[in-house]
Image (cartoon, grey):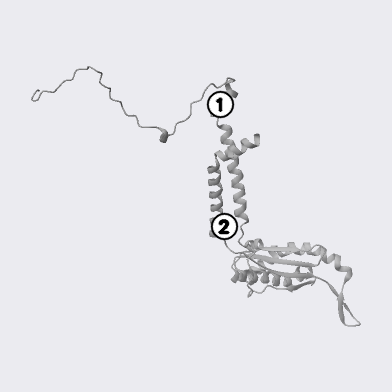
Amino acid sequence: MELKQYFLILKKRLLLIVLCVIIATLTTAVYSYTYYTPLYQASTKFIVNKTVEIEQMGREQMDLSALGVNILLINTYKEIIKSPAIMDKVTQRYPELGLTPELLSSLVNVQSVNNTQVMTLSVLDYSYERAAKIVNAVSSVFQSEIPKIMKVNNVTILHSANPDDSPTPVNKRSYQYILISAAVSLLFAAGITFLLEYLDDTLKTKEDIQKLMGVHVLTTVSKVKAKQLTTYKPISPRKQVGEPHYAKAEGSS
């Protein structure tokens, strides 16, 4: 019975619920399509590695004993990349980018895969060509400056971003926000409906009267609709038998 009453409450204010859902959904859809701006990501990859030279053979091979040290150095390199020591040099060498060191540092993101010697440097921008130029500039400066800072040359660029590529935006148009908006507005409208029902203390049914006053209802007066009303016409009184008739004299005043 309680579940049935809940459905009746929702049905009574169904128009309010539908209007809330429609308004919220249309607003989200218009905002999503009007203010959508594609965002592109360009990235480069580094490997932190140290080789040792074999004097007899004249060749270089990997220093296996330094693998653990190289992995630990990645955390240090991630902080160095976004430090003023690198950002200031990038803005000085590439003034055409038109970026300040603080803004450049906020655009650059450095990530590393666990237990590997590989680092990924990425930049997000509204133009892929500009993002590629920024990430390549930071990579080049970092590779040239790290031997001066760490006194070791163990950073190699594995992959550079190509400004001529045409990738897809990372923030594709999606109906996810529209669906979320519809669901949230539906819950909000249902909550408002139950709140209005809770605050409404008027008596609407005979059950409400019996529950409040503890008396039985003897009769009810139905509500009459306007179309059920008939026009009232006054009835002229009938003449009685033997009632005298009077004639109107002509010319009398």
Q: Residue at x 42, y 34 (%)?
A: 228
Report the amino acid beneath label 2: Ser
* Percent x, y of residue 250: 9, 25
Residue positioned most to the left: 251
Return the residue nearer the eye: 168 or 197: 197
Please tell me how many numbered marks the rendered image carries. 2
**Disc 2 vs disc 1: which is toward the camera?**
1
- Looking at the rendered image, the quarter that the N terminus falls into is top right
Q: Residue at x 55, y 40 (%)?
A: 13
> Looking at the rendering, which quadrant does residue 161 occupy?
bottom right
Numbered disc 1: secondary structure:
helix
Residue under numbered circle 1: 206
In the image, is residue 191 above or below residue 107? above
* Apparent side of residue 243 relative to residue 105 in the rendered image (left or right): left
Residue under numbered circle 2: 32
Q: Residues within 10 Å of mark 2 (few under 14, many from 20)?
A: some
